[in-house]
């Protein structure tokens, strides 16, 4: 079939949804109904290749697949599905995946209704002018409330309820009707402006034997093995070794034409050379401009990563380098701590990304690690007008040199049942947030929009939200610039010595309460010494909280039988003098278990 006719019968679409609304199960049914995968090879969540994805029910990496479908009128279509991540941490990857499509299936759980990330994903799809097919999934559940979901579809997302399809991916209900809707409602790829090669990079993985495998959507032109291509972002040239498609495993093809979704294998061995959102073009006839939307992904959350046993540093270094091969968003650089020894300062896209990295290091590389208190990137403006980006509290300049500090702010959207609205507003205020707007979703739910400091939501906020709403609340957020705040560095001192691993940047109003909490934890974690150990929380040299670890006391009068009381007093006074001298010259040994207990504990 000529490429022009192939484009007319090609449909590129993605599945977007809130976490656990049934994206991967729906993708499984598509693969079965189009006979893309043999029944003997089938397993649940086929496109989720990691054990971690299957266990937690989340998608971490994009997974494209090509399917062939014969419609009821006899026409044969080629369907390219891109299964996208659903979590807010991976919003940029989702946006690039949607840029490679013309349509999106929006999945809504019939029992849970529209959630915060549903709203965010619809906004992304609309910004890319995609045809949206709303699907009410899990209609077989006893708790399914289809009428409420249809109301929310119209009220929140402004999508007519008549466009919605009722489906149960688990029970295989309504899948054929949905496939028919895909070929009818999703438009084919638009005709290319010219025959110059333009291919959008929407993901990449590292293969130990073949190097970097680049996932692309060809917008115009064609690419085949042997062609010399160029990457727009960094201007690197390379030769194409192989092109192909996913069905769902990699399958080599002669050529990728305009409208195709597939992969390119080049001579690149470093995943950092391939950036998501970049444009691949021909070396001989490059296109005049890159495809729109490319940006360099910046880490949002930073944390120190140290081995529990300092002898495992080299193993940790090797493990992180291996992990970075398939996770270019993970940024690491070596650092050392007086208390924890040698380790790495790592940047993550968000808290889920940090949790996944920690889990993968533990599972795949058997590494036992400590993560320090997470921090964000602050803008510190000095008296001379210079601005310093700060991601580690240890490097904070002297307060006398600082004019002001600005912290990153996010715009949060929280959907909660009406009964818990007061508790959620209190939580937002407690975390220094401003509720800017409340919007009634339906008779049972309300949506709260709030401006909040990013630092206040990276630790425990989501857990508190779920606890207060008994699991029914949902959160989505997006960066919203920087604003000035009264921030200080909180130092923890043990016996007068500052412990850099426990340093953090906090709001001045919260410094005393956080210092007290950390001091209490350290008091329980540090074993008693022969002298009293002072644990202090200090801000700029001023102590704001203190706890003492009691001294071990040997009964020096145990062998004193009879005689004058002055004998006992003399022994006790001598013991006091010894403890006083020991306090001056003694060192407090903080066991590694104390760091693990404090830094791994939920804040």
Image: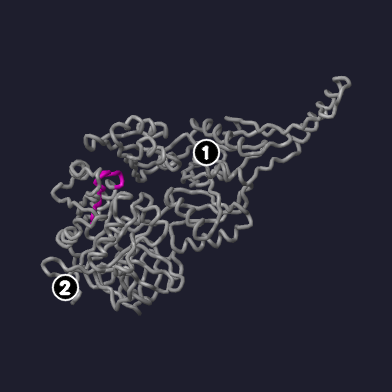
User: 216 and 525: which one is in front?
Assistant: 525
Question: What stretch of residues is rendered in magenta?
Answer: 104-117
Q: Select label 1 or label 2 by which is in front.
A: 2
Q: Which residue is under mark 1?
A: 402
SS at badge 2: helix
Residue 511: in magenta span: no
Above or below, 456 against 258 in this view is above
Label 1 environment density (alpha carbons within 10 Å; few <14, some 14–19, many ≥20): some
Label 1 to label 2, Cα distance in Å? 64 Å
Left or right relative to 519: residue 274: left
Residue plotted at (77% across, 36% down): 582
Location of residue 60 by image quarter: bottom left
Q: Position of residue 398 (x, y in %)?
A: 57, 39
Q: Between disc 1 and disc 2, whose residue precedes?
A: 2
User: 529 and 457: which one is in front?
Assistant: 529
Q: Position of residue 228 (x, y in %)?
A: 36, 76
Q: Which mark is residue 5?
A: 2
């Amino acid at each position: 079939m000529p490429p022009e006719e192939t484009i007319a019968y090609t449909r590129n679409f993605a599945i977007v949804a809130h976490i656990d609304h049934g994206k991967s199960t729906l993708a499984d049914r598509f693969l079965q109904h189009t006979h893309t995968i043999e029944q003997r090879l089938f397993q649940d969540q086929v496109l989720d290749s990691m054990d971690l994805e299957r266990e937690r029910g989340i998608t971490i990496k994009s997974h494209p697949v090509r399917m062939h479908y014969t419609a009821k009128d006899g026409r044969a279509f080629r369907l390219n599905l891109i299964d996208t991540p659903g979590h807010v941490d991976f919003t940029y990857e989702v946006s690039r995946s949607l840029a490679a499509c013309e349509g999106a299936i929006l999945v809504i759980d019939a029992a849970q209704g529209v959630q915060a990330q549903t709203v965010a994903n619809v906004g992304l799809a609309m910004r890319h002018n995609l045809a949206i097919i709303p699907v009410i999934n899990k209609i077989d559940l006893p708790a399914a409330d289809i009428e409420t979901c249809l109301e929310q579809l119209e009220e929140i997302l402004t999508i007519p309820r008549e466009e919605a399809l009722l489906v149960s991916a688990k029970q295989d209900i309504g899948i054929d009707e949905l496939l028919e809707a895909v070929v009818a409602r999703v438009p084919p790829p638009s005709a290319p402006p010219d025959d110059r090669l333009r291919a959008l990079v929407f993901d990449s993985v590292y293969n130990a034997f073949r190097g970097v495998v680049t996932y692309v959507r060809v917008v115009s032109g064609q690419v085949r093995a042997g062609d010399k291509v160029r990457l727009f972002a960094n201007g690197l040239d390379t030769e194409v070794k192989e092109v192909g498609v996913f069905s769902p495993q990699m399958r080599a093809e002669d050529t990728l034409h305009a409208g195709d979704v597939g992969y390119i294998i080049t001579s690149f061995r470093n995943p950092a050379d391939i950036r998501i959102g970049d444009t691949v073009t021909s070396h001989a006839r490059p296109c005049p401009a890159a495809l729109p939307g490319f940006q360099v992904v910046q880490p949002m959350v930073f944390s120190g990563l140290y081995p529990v046993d300092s002898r495992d540093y080299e193993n940790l270094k090797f493990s992180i380098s291996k992990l970075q091969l398939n996770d270019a968003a993970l940024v690491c650089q070596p650092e050392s701590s007086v208390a924890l020894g040698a380790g790495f300062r790592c940047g993550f896209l968000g808290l889920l990304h940090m949790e996944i990295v920690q889990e993968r290091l533990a599972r795949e590389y058997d590494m036992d690690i400590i993560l320090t208190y997470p921090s964000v990137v602050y803008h510190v403006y000095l008296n001379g007008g210079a601005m310093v980006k700060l991601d580690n509290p240890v490097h904070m300049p002297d307060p006398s040199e600082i004019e002001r500090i600005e912290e990153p702010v996010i715009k949060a959207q929280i959907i909660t049942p009406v009964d818990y609205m007061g508790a959620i507003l209190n939580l937002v205020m407690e975390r220094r947030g401003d509720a800017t707007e409340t919007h009634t979703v339906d008779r049972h739910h309300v949506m709260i929009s709030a401006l909040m400091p990013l630092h206040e939501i990276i630790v425990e906020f989501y857990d508190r939200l779920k606890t207060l709403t008994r699991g029914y609340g949902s959160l989505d957020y997006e960066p919203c610039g920087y604003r000035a705040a009264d921030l200080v560095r909180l130092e923890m001192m043990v016996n007068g010595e500052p412990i850099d691993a426990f340093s953090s940047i906090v709001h001045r109003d919260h410094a005393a309460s956080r210092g007290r909490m950390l001091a209490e934890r350290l008091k329980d974690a540090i074993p008693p010494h022969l002298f009293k150990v002072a644990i202090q929380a200090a801000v700029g040299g001023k102590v704001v909280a203190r706890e003492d670890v009691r001294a071990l006391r040997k009964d020096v009068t145990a062998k004193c039988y009879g005689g004058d009381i002055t004998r006992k007093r003399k022994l006790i006074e001598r013991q006091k003098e010894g403890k006083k001298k020991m306090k001056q010259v003694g060192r407090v040994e903080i066991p590694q278990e104390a760091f693990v207990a404090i830094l791994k504990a939920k804040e």
